[in-house]
Image: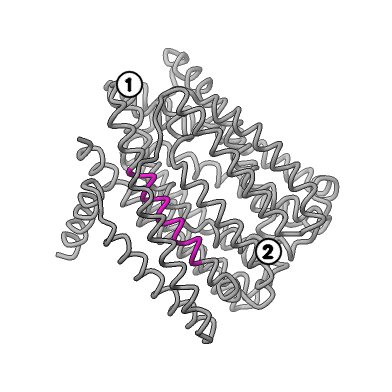
Amino acid sequence: MINKELVDITKKSGIVFLGRVFSTIFGFLFSLAAARLMGADVYGKLMYVTVIITMLSLVTKLGLTQGLVQFISRFTENNRIEERNSIISFSFLLVSVFSIILSVILFIFSDFIALNIFNNQKLASLLKVMSPILILLSLIELTPGIFRGLKIVKYQVLGRDLIQSFIRLIMVLILGYLGYKIYGLVAAFYLSMAFSLLYLFYKVYDLNLFGKIKCKFITSYKEILIFSAPLLISSILHYSISKVDIFMIGYFLNTSSVGIYTVALKIGTLTNFLLFSINSMFAPNITTLYYNNQMVKLEKLYQVITKWVLGINLSVFFLFIILSKEIMNVFGTEFIIGWIALILITAGQVVNAGVGSAGLINVMTGYPKSELYVSIIVFVINVTLNYFLIPIYGIEGAAFASLISIGVMNLLRLYILYNRLEILPYNKKYLHVIYSAIIAFIIGYIINSYIDLHYLLHILVIGFIFTAIDIFANWQFGLEEDDIMILNKIKEKLLKNKK
């Protein structure tokens, strides 16, 4: 039975899930406010530079976020507390030094980078102003590895997901209302990240997780760096796979197109937080089950989790096919032209959900190099497709390139996983979630053709009808014992919180 593991993952990923839900809502509202108040061009410029800063933060983190999950989990289980805390301090110091150096380089060479790499001299001043954000972002993004390794996710959720996204939203509303445009958005980023980092540092200190960096632990320092090195490269390549389209749209087209495509990307990847939330707490369980040779439990967990994630993503995909134009119109009429890109991006998330945690399992079972190999192959494919498709088909070409790249990436991950461990995420129960989504789509599409309402009301009405049909169909097809157990645990948790 996998009841204990499922309850553990459901409970803890539930915390992450709620945090990501609110973070996603706040982030969505931030994008909505920024897009409507500033327009596609200004919003596009900010997102373009943000992609660059985030890419550089992956370099400065050195892959240590994922490495900390593995090492902290192992050291805590073996009661090697002093060594664990020393590695945490070592990681913070290393990331701080690298992020400061790279931030200074970005500031000094911003003119050269804007003109010769991004083909847009107007971005130079924005790169200068935003370069110190690299330091804040790098340190903030390192902390999830600590809390996930300790299986204490509430601090990560509050500091990284809620505080940061909420303050950023409030600031952009205030500054946007006062008439500040792009630098008002930049100020919102600075303030939200500063508050978030202060809170996260305080919690690490309060939990007595900072330790002295000692020569006797140098072997552990080397081990975590060696373990994290392939993850550094694969994380850069993986992020590039998902964001190179934005970079190349900005290079070949304009920042207005970047703004429109970024909105489609944010909406189309809304359900990402579901897989991310589950993976956040699934990772330590993978390590424990694998090293205890409990492969049957591991495969069953993988199947149950992937089925849930796929079902939700498939339903969202069909709903977006029906309402893509209305959804893009929420951000302004100039964004409606991104409706095809939205559908293609969402299709990519269905493919991603259909394979689930395959890449994570490969990493956490001692084969991190697999992600490196896969990422290199897919990165080359993605860049090549974008290079040829964007000049011809615009943002739709970028979205299609992303869809193909995600498909290849996940097929390779699954192939490697099956060859190594002979486990798959699929069983006959998968057909139930597919049938339910198809039924909801057919009925929703027919009803949609007879309804003509204001776009906001249209979204609400069709969305409610589609969701109700989907839930009813899933219920009629029947739920597995593990599904019912998870739902009961969620129900108990909600009732407990209500009391």
**Residue 307 magenta:** yes
Q: Which residues are magenta?
A: 304-319
Question: From the viewer's perspective, is residue 213 above or below residue 176?
Answer: above
* Residue at the image point whose x is 57% and y is 66% from the top: 31
Of callouts 1 and 2, which one flags the residue occurring earlier in the amino acid sequence? Answer: 2
Label 1 with label 2: CB-CB less than 8 Å: no
Give the amino acid at mark 2: Gly
The percent position of residue 193, horizontal first and vertical second, equals 52, 53
In this figure, which residue is indicated by the disc labeled 2? 259
Q: Residues within 10 Å of mark 1 (few under 14, many from 20)?
A: few
Cα distance, mark 1 to mark 2? 46 Å
Classify the position of the C terminus by image quarter: bottom left
Give the class, few, some or many, for how many residues have Cα within 10 Å of label 2's Cα (few <14, many ≥20).
many
Q: Is residue 233 visible in the rendered structure shown here?
A: yes
Q: What's under tag 1, amino acid-wise?
A: Tyr
Image side of residue 23 versus residue 377, left or right: left
Residue 451 at x, y = what percent?
50, 85
Check the picture and name the quadrant holding the N terminus. top left
* Element assignment for label 1: helix
217, above or below 48, in the image = above
Instruction: Residue under label 1, please give it.
Output: 291
